[in-house]
Amino acid sequence: MKLTDALSPEELELRKNDAQEFKTTHELNFEVADWDPNKTKIGKFLNLAMDTSAFLQFKVGTVYGLWTSTSDSYIILSIYNEEPGNGHFEDVLEWFYFSCVRDKKHLRIEELMNDDFVRHLREERGFAILATTAVKFWDSMKKDLNELETSKKENLTEESDA
């Protein structure tokens, strides 16, 4: 089932309008597709360990992964950047932050296995680390988005002054 299947036509239109108004740092779209866990090795493994039927694929620039939504959280199960360092991970977080603030949901990144990534999420991004899960609460993401918008406006002002 797609997330959009559970939304009313009015909610779909509101989200469509929100997405058109929201721009990430690199102006990348958030693309979503169904995920068939039986077509991948990791999917077959995960199917044994957990219910993966609710997960969808996402792609933002060169970053892709799996995500789902619950009543109180957006959950990223896996995330991979084909070109680390190009800034597209920033756009992924901006999309999730925007969605979390809009929907008043928390962001969870599950199954953390990379110590450097855990350190980055905790020290650079302000996530709380709980065992193998990183959590960021929606009200702190609202502050992050406000700071991002202020920074974008300042950059535009500097560019127009030059």
Image (tube, grey):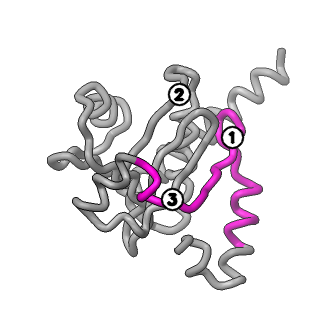
> Image height check: is 155 above or below 73?
above
Judging depth in this view, the residue of 77 and 52 nearest the camera is 52
The residue stretch that appears in magenta:
14-40
Q: CA distance from mark 2 to mark 1?
A: 15 Å
Judging by the rendered image, the residue that carries numbered circle 3 is 35
Q: Residue at x 68, y 33 (%)?
A: 26
Judge whether residue 23 is colored magenta.
yes
Judging by the rendered image, the residue that carries numbered circle 2 is 82
Amino acid at the residue labelled 2:
Glu
Q: Earlier in the sequence, mark 2 or mark 1?
A: 1
Q: Is residue 41 left or right of residue 65?
A: left
Q: Earlier in the sequence, mark 3 or mark 2?
A: 3
Q: CA distance from mark 3 to mark 1?
A: 21 Å
How far across and down, in percent of the image, does residue 106 sit? 38, 60
**Mark number for residue 28?**
1
Amino acid at the residue labelled 1:
Leu
Q: Residue furthest top?
A: 162
Q: Residue at x 60, y 78 (%)?
A: 5
How far across and down, in percent of the image, does residue 18 sit? 70, 62
Q: Residue at x 63, y 42 (%)?
A: 149
> SS at mark 1?
loop
Q: Residue at x 39, y 75 (%)?
A: 71
Amino acid at the residue labelled 3:
Trp
> Image height check: is 10 above or below 54?
below
